[in-house]
Image: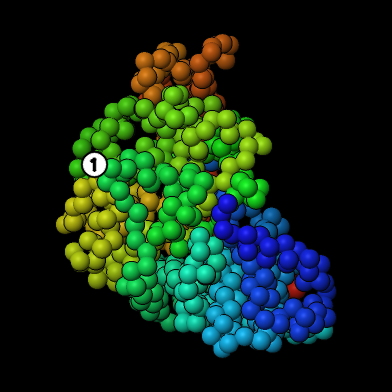
Amino acid sequence: MKNHIAILIGALALCSCEDYLTQENPNKIESEYYFTDESSLEIYTNGFIRSFATAIKSFVDGDKNADTHSWDGQAAYFMDNYSADDATNWTTSNWSQLRSINYYLDNMRNAVASDAILDHYEGVGRFFRALFYIDKVQTFGAVPWYDTSIDATDREALFKDRDNREFVASKILEDLDYACTYCLTSDKYRVRASYIHRYVALALKARFCLYEGTMRKYHAVDPSTGRAWTKDESRFYLGECVKACEEIMGDGVYKLTDDPAKRQTQYRDMFTNADACGVYTDEFIWARDYDIDLKVTYAINNYMVNPQHANYAFTRQFIDTYLMTDGTPFTSKYPDYDDLDLVAECTDRDYRLAQTIRTPGFTRDGGTTQWAPDVKFSKTGYQPIKWLTDDSSKDTNVAAIASDVPLIRYAEVLLAYAEAKAELGEMSEEVWDKTIKPLRERAGVKSIYPTAADPYMVEYFQNQVTDPFILEVRRERGIELTMEDSRYQDIIRWHQGELFARPWKGVWISAVDTPLDLNADGTPETIVTANPKLQSTLNILMIDGASEAGHKLSRGTSGNILPSTALERKWQDYKYVKPIPTTARQENPNLTQNPKW
């Protein structure tokens, strides 16, 4: 049995006092009762872990609206059909999380414990306050900053306006710096990557500072004001990212898990292994630890195979960024790269491609069954497998699956370090060899130190950058961290929002009304047709050249799948932050609104 019973006990213990924590006046709780010793601090903070360690479905869904995916969800936001009346994520219950954190921080030092233990647990509390505010800043920009419990009668505090976004960011960094300084690194805190310790704090600091540094660099104005930033702090935040990464890398506690004999399978195994927190303890910095025995499970396979969840599909534009195994761009190898069928385009590519989508030769159930892309499920034909376990008997909506979820991996630290150094103009072959090179070699890709920008990547990012190092880090980050709740915010901070509205493309289809063998196993399984009366045992993809509501092929009766454009997406710069919900401003008229919302 996995050793995370303490987390479960802590979560259950918090449930017993949750009614009190959400009362109108939580200060009625006697802190002497709750905060008596280290054990009580552990129990309380384990409740934060339960609340903030992202669940598998939310984690995987985080990038569905990004440029890498073809998905109609949240269509209103991307169609100029969204207003402050539709906005969410600013509810009283949501802010009650902050109330619980601040209440804890106000009272936790009443516990009897050594200074080191008290400092550690204050760091844990401040880590979660930073995490709470990072989400708020990335969603709304400027928000009210509270670092202490607010009395129900303190109307001035309760009804104040938003604080300046730059101020809130500086306070987040203060909290993270405290956690990075005082959180301990003992084995008991690092067991199964399930708790908060100094390296988790450093990794979150690196993530946040990379976001802030690039946000300030690529956005000429603060999206919360529509005016220029009050000061240029881009290099400051990027430098703080570098420092945090160097501390993690320098201590040598973490490393990439790489067995050359398993390079064609080990990447995906991190996301499907039922004991990943144990197997990948050298790479997982923070994770959500699931457990069959404790019935802490989920049914993720169903979301990857059931057509009623037809939400998961990659775009050809993103798939084209995967390199060849010889280290050269796929798009430079084949002049007509989009005209290649699935078999040809998947040949000799980065091993992560075949561990991320269904490619020819993909099998499950111990290699006994072939699984072709299902166009009924995946509208572009690029169907994800990264989180799909091999046991097809677990494909139901009630299946118990316990693959662990790496919320922060060491690979992300290497990528953050490489990106920050590249953005600072400090990329070198030494930095490359410590970061991008081992990631590519683990994926079976020859590492080539770039001397010129790849034209495809320049065009992909709308001619915004021509620095080859920045572009290669973006390529590597997109591939390594895909479906790990990072790409959407990457596009936001890079000021590339127009990519959200870019038309989608899918796999190449050679002909309509012709049985197709997409996975090259010798048996056709797919047919594309415009005939609504066609009946077939094959997977049918309906196209409709006369209607915007239907799929099309780029050349009419052949070509790339062009998913439905009925929901035309648009992007405006004011969408880099979401609006303050109307309900929130009705409750607190002092809250100002983001520009143009």
Q: Compared to 73, does 565 lie above or below? A: above
- Name the spot of residue 278 as percent of width and height, x first: 47, 54
- Which residue was labeled with disc 1? 325
User: Amino acid type of disc 1?
Assistant: Thr
Work out whether residue 11 or residue 171 is closer to the camera in this orientation and state it: 11
Q: Compared to 448, does 246 lie above or below? A: below
- Name the spot of residue 517 as percent of width and height, x first: 39, 19
Q: What is the total number of numbered labels drawn onto the structure image?
A: 1
Which quarter of the image is occupied by the C terminus? bottom right
The answer to which image quadrant residue 150 occupies is bottom right
Question: Residue shown at 71%/82% (left/top)?
Answer: 36
Question: Residue shown at 30%/32% (left/top)?
Answer: 345
As drawn, the residue found furthest toward the left would be 451
**Is residue 238 something one can see in this rendering?**
no
Question: Residue shown at 29%/28% (left/top)?
Answer: 344
As drawn, the residue found furthest toward the front would be 1
Q: Is residue 85 left or right of residue 299?
A: right
**Is residue 342 something one can see in this rendering?**
yes
Question: Residue shown at 62%/85% (left/top)?
Answer: 113
Work out whether residue 590 or residue 73 is closer to the camera in this orientation and state it: 73
- Name the spot of residue 537 as percent of width and height, x first: 53, 13
Neighbor class of circle 1 (other Cα within 10 Å; few <14, some 14-19, many 20+) is many
Q: Compared to 25, does 187 lie above or below? A: above
